[in-house]
Image: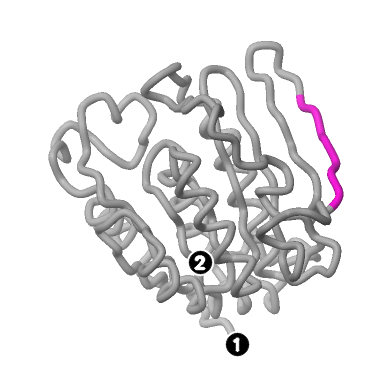
Amino acid sequence: MLTSNEQLRYSRQTMLKHIGENGQLKLRNASVLIVGMGGLGNPVAMYLNAAGVGRIMIADGDNIEITNLQRQVLFGESDLTQNKADCAAEKLNKNNSDTQIEVIDEMLDEELGQFYIPQVDVVVDCSDNIETRYLVNSLCVDHKKPFVVGAATGFDGQQLVVDPRKDNAACYQCFFPISEKAPANNCQTVGILGPVLAIIAGLQALQTIKLLTGIDVKYNQLNVYDGFYNQWQQFNISKQVDCPICQNN
């Protein structure tokens, strides 16, 4: 049962028929791992914290630099040189003390992933490198954890949901097979506009809330956003029978 304070705080959510008090209780009892506390991780964490997700783990080993401030909206000039996960946790705790914030002040590697991913209900990938995304994809498939992916560079963004609990679900590597020739595009190499990150992060947070509350989420679909022309495209893909990650899942 929600407390009187929770009823008031989350009233604009619980009035939605697909959320209600039962959905809010699911959020309160849920746990999420956010991998990366940069331009995507900042708004994702803010929205999930504000929505009342009970336990949020945030993983990032980087420190805040002045180049981050243009898009990483949790941080300010007084936060420079601090660890991103530590600083974000401090600010999120001030926003909503109902949420338990746990800090992993290191870059997520296989050992940390094997330990933390089984503990959560949903993993949200907000990392800025493809190697981490492939690793988290593999671990989520192994542990059958839903995986909400986001990426953005320049004016463009992508978002998809991987749900290994579904028999016919494609994984991230089905969409993007590993290629040694793939370019290492990220914010440092091609730039980024902050609002594009906000759009993709907002969709990631929305998909996460839907997963946690039992609302159907479309999987096997890549959502691609063109911020320059303000256009969305959706691409569907089937599970690949030769995928080395999920073919036996």
Q: Is residue 233 magenta?
A: yes
Q: Is residue 172 above or below residue 111?
A: above
Residue at image x 64%, y 43%? 203
Q: Residues within 10 Å of mark 1 (few under 14, many from 20)?
A: few
Q: Which scheme is used to colour this image of the protein?
A: one colour
The amino acid type, in three-letter code, at marker 2 is Val
| Secondary element at image label 2 | strand
Q: Nearer the viewer, mark 1 or mark 2?
A: 2
Outermost residue toward the top? 229
Please name the predominant secondary structure of the magenta segment in the image: strand
Q: CA distance from mark 1 to mark 2?
A: 21 Å
Mark 1 lies on residue: 1
Where is residue 155 drawn, in percent x and y? 57, 18
Residue situated in front as seen by the camera: 154 or 180: 180
Residue at image x 58%, y 61%? 138
Residue situated in front as seen by the camera: 212 or 177: 177
Q: Is residue 228 left or right of residue 125?
A: right
The amino acid type, in three-letter code, at marker 1 is Met
> From where the camera sits, is residue 121 visible?
yes
Looking at the rendering, the stretch of residues picked out in magenta corresponds to 232-238
Where is residue 146 drawn, in percent x and y? 65, 64
| Secondary element at image label 1 | loop
Mark 2 lies on residue: 32
Residue situated in front as seen by the camera: 230 or 158: 158
